[in-house]
């Protein structure tokens, strides 16, 4: 087999391939023998049908099958031989089979671009990590709300804002039921979580009272097929409840069951430490995002359209999975896949540039992921998910899944490496990063 590679530009290459006639002839012989054994032709025994008869009846199908195998095998061999880093399926210009002559065809592919790293050390502006008393109070209030219980309203039987009402309701549109009736639904009046106008209609209702009213679905309603349409509601008030939020005290702290927290003072100190760690991670994460932006800005290169397209598709699937988990169908919220992909293009391009640049840094700085790194990550995942290590390992026995994990760890490792060598200019005063750690013998200095 002969193969020559011609670079059209930074991301497209054309491979011209010539397969010897003997290779094609051997494949044709094998294919016709298989057909002869499988088909029944009147006047001939199976396996004894002459080649010219088979060619007349099955020639086109046989040649297509043969060319598919010949092209697949020769293209793979050419890519390996010439170290072509193809990232797309080949666009083929196929030739015709001619008796006694080599089979020739060309394959045009997108290739991974060669990246010249011009700058990887940056100054990055970051926030100073701080935790305010207001943040601590808000966090504690959230914990109190989480521990709140519903208690019956005493001394009145009329619903008012702030109450949690227990209601039955059903909806009709043009005399037809819109969904199934709902029983004992909890709704906090004044929360703004219901259809606009619904909570207002319930305020003032008395226990066991039933009420009917009309409402129109607004322009921003999640179910686009209902936007602007009017519906008739039937509501019955079953019960009135109030949220009873516990006061902060030693008993409340003990009920939380936080290790090392037996008093309010110890609890507040614990909250302060947790919030500080959360803020530290948030600031670090945002600083890394800025670092990636600078890396992209200072190291421009063309990107293969197929990689962007695949990333767009991955982002759309991720969004669909998220909405599905939330119990929302994309059609209900008026999301169209083509529109979603278009809106995801800019983010997809950034993701692809980031991935390719971090891979290039890994190659230049000799950064690699060892088996010990994978083992440590699997232990971390097992702990986070509350699963046994054996169970988590079984999820990554598949070579593709393990390769994805390895690549993600490599990207994280490179980003940490760059971050350690980054000068952090903090908004209030300058905060120097920790000394670069050694990564496979390389530090962030002297490079």
Image (cartoon, helix red, strand yellow):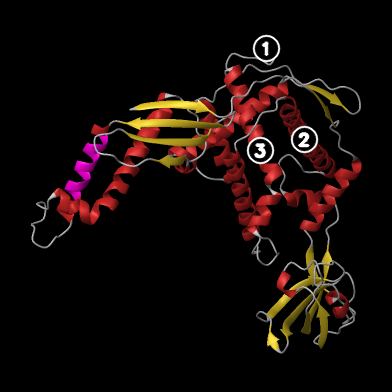
Look at mark 2 in the image and give the residue it sits on.
286
Give the label, 3 or 1, closer to the camera: 3
- Residue 28 lies, in percent from the top left, at 23, 42
Give the label, 3 or 2, closer to the camera: 3
Q: In which quarter of the image is the N terminus?
A: top left
Look at mark 1 in the image and give the residue it sits on.
447
Is residue 179 covered in magenta?
A: no
User: Residue 317 versus residue 34: which sits nearer the camera?
Assistant: 34
Q: For the point 68% across and 67% down, which residue is it?
A: 332
Magenta-highlighted residues: 23-34
Left or right: 415 as drawn, with respect to 228: left
Dot 1 and dot 2 residues touching (CB under 8 Å): no
Labels 3 and 2: the sequence-earlier one:
2
Labels 1 and 2: the sequence-earlier one:
2
Secondary structure at badge 1 equals: loop
What's the CA distance linking mark 3 and mark 2? Answer: 15 Å
Residue 133, visible in the rendered structure: yes
Using the image, determine if residue 24 lies above or below residue 224: above
Give residue 363's quadrant in the image.
Answer: top right
Q: For the point 80% across and 87% down, which residue is it?
A: 208
Q: Residue 351 carries which label?
A: 3
- Residue 151 lies, in percent from the top left, at 80, 70
- Residue 209 lies, in percent from the top left, at 82, 88
Is residue 30 covered in magenta?
A: yes
């Amino acid at each position: 087999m002969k193969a020559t590679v011609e670079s059209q530009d930074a991301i497209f290459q054309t491979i011209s391939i010539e397969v010897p006639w003997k290779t094609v002839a051997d494949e044709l012989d094998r294919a016709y023998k298989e057909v002869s054994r499988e088909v029944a032709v009147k006047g001939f025994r199976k396996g004894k049908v002459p080649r010219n008869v088979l060619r007349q009846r099955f020639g086109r199908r046989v040649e297509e099958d043969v060319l598919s195998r010949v092209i697949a095998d020769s293209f793979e061999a050419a890519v390996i031989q010439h170290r072509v880093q193809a990232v797309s399926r080949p666009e083929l210009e196929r030739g015709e089979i001619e008796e006694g002559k080599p089979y020739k065809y060309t394959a045009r592919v997108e290739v991974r671009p060669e990246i010249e790293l011009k700058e990887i050390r940056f100054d990055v502006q970051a926030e100073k990590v701080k935790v305010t008393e207001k943040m601590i109070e808000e966090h504690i209030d959230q914990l109190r709300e989480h521990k709140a219980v519903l208690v019956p309203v005493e001394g009145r039987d009329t619903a008012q804002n702030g109450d949690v009402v227990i209601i039955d309701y059903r909806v009709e549109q043009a005399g037809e039921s819109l969904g199934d009736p709902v029983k004992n639904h909890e709704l906090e009046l004044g929360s703004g979580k219901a259809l606009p106008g619904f909570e207002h209609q319930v305020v003032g209702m008395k226990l066991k009272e039933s009420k009917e009213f009309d409402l129109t679905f607004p322009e921003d309603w999640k179910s686009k097929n209902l936007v602007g349409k009017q519906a008739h509601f039937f509501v019955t008030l079953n019960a009135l409840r109030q949220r009873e939020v516990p006061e902060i005290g030693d008993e409340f702290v003990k009920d939380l069951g936080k290790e090392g927290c037996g008093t309010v003072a110890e609890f507040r100190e614990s909250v302060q430490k947790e919030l500080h760690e959360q803020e530290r991670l948030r600031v670090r994460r945002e600083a890394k995002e800025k670092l990636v932006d600078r890396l992209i800005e200072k190291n421009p290169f063309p990107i293969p359209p197929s990689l962007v397209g695949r990333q767009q598709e991955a982002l759309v699937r991720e969004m669909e999975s998220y909405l599905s988990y939330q119990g929302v169908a994309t059609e209900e919220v008026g999301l169209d896949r083509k529109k979603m992909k278009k809106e995801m293009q800019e983010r997809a391009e950034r993701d692809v540039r980031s991935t390719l640049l971090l891979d290039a840094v890994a190659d230049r700085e000799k950064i690699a992921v060892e088996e010990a790194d994978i083992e440590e990550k699997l232990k971390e995942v097992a702990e986070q998910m509350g699963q046994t290590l054996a169970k988590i390992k079984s999820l990554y026995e598949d070579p593709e899944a393990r390769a994805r994990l390895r690549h993600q760890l490599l990207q994280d490792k490179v980003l940490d490496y760059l971050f350690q060598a980054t000068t952090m200019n903090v908004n209030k005063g300058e905060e120097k990063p920790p000394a670069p750690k050694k990564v496979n013998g390389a530090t962030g200095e002297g490079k």
